[in-house]
Image: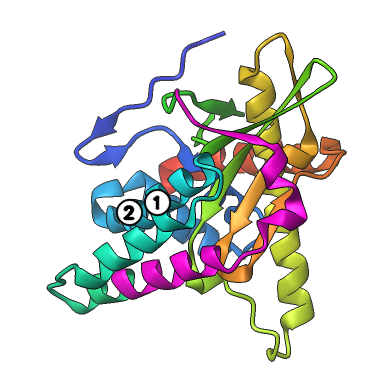
């Protein structure tokens, strides 16, 4: 099988690449929006703020999960952010949204998902990639989830999403359609997470769908992977084939 080389030429990514969250969005949106998503990845210097905006908040949330839901980690981060100086409206919006996100996590009921029984670990290998139909997908789980029972090790992983633009509006006349599209997007993301985790799990570990989670903070949604992902994965492969086919034209 030939090797696909991913390189930057004059700040342009020459071969198709996308993140897991954006692939889920790509698969459930209209063609015009699909093109904008691909432009973010083909021309990264023009869209660099898309990838680094909430790093500080996400780092605190990961430590909160790893350290047995220690709320002081989130509270300390909120205080640091409140004292942080900003230079423009973009930085102010990022600061305010980060604080809002951390407060949402503080008020989320993790006990409904048995998090007290799980072992949460940091993702020790962030360079692992997933390739589907010629597209390099950056998965990079935020945390790894493990659960031991009767000498068996079950494993999963989680992606965290902070985005107010994806927040569902229950008052919208299109709410039902938006909700169905939202669920479909979560199913795609969690299905890719499961596939990725299966690729890199150890021989003594069993990947469990219920432990492959997408955590959408502003929608208060902790969404597990469906038990069956065959049909969804066929759609994922078809979407990646399309990305490969049109990448040069972006």
Give the residues in magenta: 95-124
**Which SS class for mark 1?**
helix
Q: Residue at x 36, y 45 (%)?
A: 42
Residue 216 rendering spot, x and y as whole percentages: 59, 60
Tell me the crowding category of disc 2: few under 14, some 14 to 19, or many 20 or more residues within 10 angstroms, Cα based: few
Residue 39 shows in this picture: no
**Horizontal side of residue 117 vs 137, given as left or right:** right
Residue matched to label 1? 60
92 to the left or right of 126:
left
Instruction: Please say if the residues under marks 1 and 2 sit with CB atoms less than 8 Å apart.
Output: yes
Residue 115 magenta: yes
What residue is disc 2 on?
A: 56
Quarter of the image with the N terminus in it: top right
Task: Compare residues 141 and 148 and report the one nearer the observer.
Answer: 148
User: SS class of the residue under badge 2?
Assistant: helix
Q: Residue at point 42% right, 24% down? A: 127
How many numbered markers are drawn?
2
Q: Is residue 162 above or below residue 141?
A: below
Is residue 202 in the magenta section?
no
- Percent x, y for residue 177? 76, 75
| Towards the viewer: 229 or 93 | 93
Tell which of 245 and 167 is nearer to you: 167
Identify the residue at horizontal 32%, vertical 54% (top origin). 56
Q: Main SS of the magenta segment?
A: helix
Task: Say above or below: 240 vs 34.
Answer: above
Q: Is 200 drawn above or below residue 89 in the view shown?
A: above
């Amino acid at each position: 099988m030939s090797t696909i080389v991913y390189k930057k030429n004059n700040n342009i990514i020459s071969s198709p690449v996308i993140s897991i969250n954006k692939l889920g969005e790509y698969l459930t949106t209209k063609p015009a929006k699909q093109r904008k998503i691909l432009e973010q990845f083909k021309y990264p210097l023009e869209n660099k703020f898309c990838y680094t905006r909430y790093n500080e908040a996400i780092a605190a949330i990961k430590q909160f999960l790893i350290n047995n839901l220690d709320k002081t980690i989130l509270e300390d981060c909120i205080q640091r952010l409140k004292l942080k100086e900003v230079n423009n409206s973009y930085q102010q919006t990022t600061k305010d949204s980060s604080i809002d996100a951390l407060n949402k996590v503080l008020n989320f009921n993790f006990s409904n998902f048995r998090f007290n029984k799980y072992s949460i670990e940091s993702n020790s290998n962030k360079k692992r990639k997933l390739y589907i139909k010629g597209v390099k997908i950056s998965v990079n789980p935020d945390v790894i989830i493990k659960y031991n029972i009767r000498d068996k090790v079950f494993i999963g992983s989680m992606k965290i999403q902070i985005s107010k633009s994806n927040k569902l509006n229950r008052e919208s006349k299109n709410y039902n359609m938006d909700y169905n599209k939202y669920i479909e997007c979560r199913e795609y993301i969690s299905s890719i997470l499961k596939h990725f985790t299966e690729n890199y799990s150890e021989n003594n570990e069993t990947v469990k769908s219920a432990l492959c989670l997408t955590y959408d903070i502003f929608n208060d949604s902790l969404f597990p992977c469906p038990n069956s992902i065959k049909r969804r994965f066929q759609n994922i492969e078809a979407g990646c084939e399309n990305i490969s086919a049109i990448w040069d034209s972006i």
